[in-house]
Amino acid sequence: LMIPSYKEMMFPILKFIAEQGSASRKDVFEFVAKHFKLNEDEKNQRTSNGTITFINRADWAVIYLVSNKQILQLPPSKRVLQKKDRGVYEITKFGKESLKGKDAFAKFNAWYEAVYNNKINTDSQILQQQAKTPNDVLIETSNELMQNLKSQILDEISQKDPSFFEYLVAK
């Protein structure tokens, strides 16, 4: 089975949301299944923890476009997507600009590299990295994953109807 990685999903998802203006998580999942021509086996494949693989990867792609630590450290003028509402995302002015022209994919990759593989470290950043113990790094990473998971859970709950929320609270 060849389900694309979250990174391979990012650019098509960005283009899709740009074409729509905004999109819900459900819209993104439907788009990914259609765009990548996933067959029934691929649509139903699950990760070891039981979540549907392509939905899990699409969620991570959106998180890497909207709300993880590196994105939140960017000035809003350098973000390609933003949260419009719970589980609904919209293209930013910068996002629209980055998709203009034939070199849109190259511009997206340059943005991704600058955000996620930034090799330019200041002396203070280097000192901070050296001061961290492996345990500090693990705790920081765990906290970041927990924050992303909380965001995913809240988005998922907000997509459900009010009776589901009442059921969830009552349990």
Image: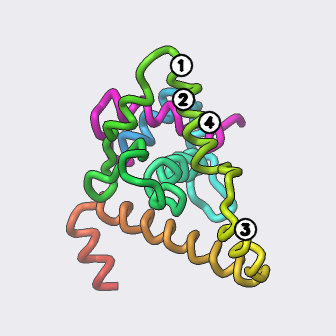
- Quadrant occupied by the C terminus: bottom left
In the image, the segment drawn in magenta is 1-25
Dot 1 and dot 2 residues touching (CB under 8 Å): yes
| Residue type at tag 3 | Ile
Reading the image, the residue beneath label 1 is 103
Mark 1 and mark 4: span between their CA atoms? 17 Å
Dot 4 and dot 2 residues touching (CB under 8 Å): no
Q: Earlier in the sequence, mark 1 or mark 4?
A: 4
Q: Earlier in the sequence, mark 2 or mark 3?
A: 2
Q: Which element type, helix, strand or loop, lies under badge 2?
A: helix
| Residue type at tag 4 | Glu
Reading the image, the residue beneath label 4 is 8
**Nearer the camera: disc 1 or disc 3:** 3
Reading the image, the residue beneath label 2 is 107
| Occupied quadrant, residue 37 | top right
Which residue is found at the position 63% from the left and 77% from the top? 140
| Residue type at tag 1 | Asp
Which residue is found at the position 23% from the left and 61% from the top? 161
Q: Earlier in the sequence, mark 4 or mark 2?
A: 4
Q: Nearer the viewer, residue 38 or 131?
A: 131
In this rendering, is residue 116 above or below 1? Answer: below
Which residue is found at the position 54% from the left and 74% from the top? 146
Residue 50 percent coordinates (x, y): 61, 61
**Residue 9 shown in magenta:** yes
Which residue is found at the position 28% from the left and 34% from the top? 21
Dot 3 and dot 4 residues touching (CB under 8 Å): no
Reading the image, the residue beneath label 3 is 126
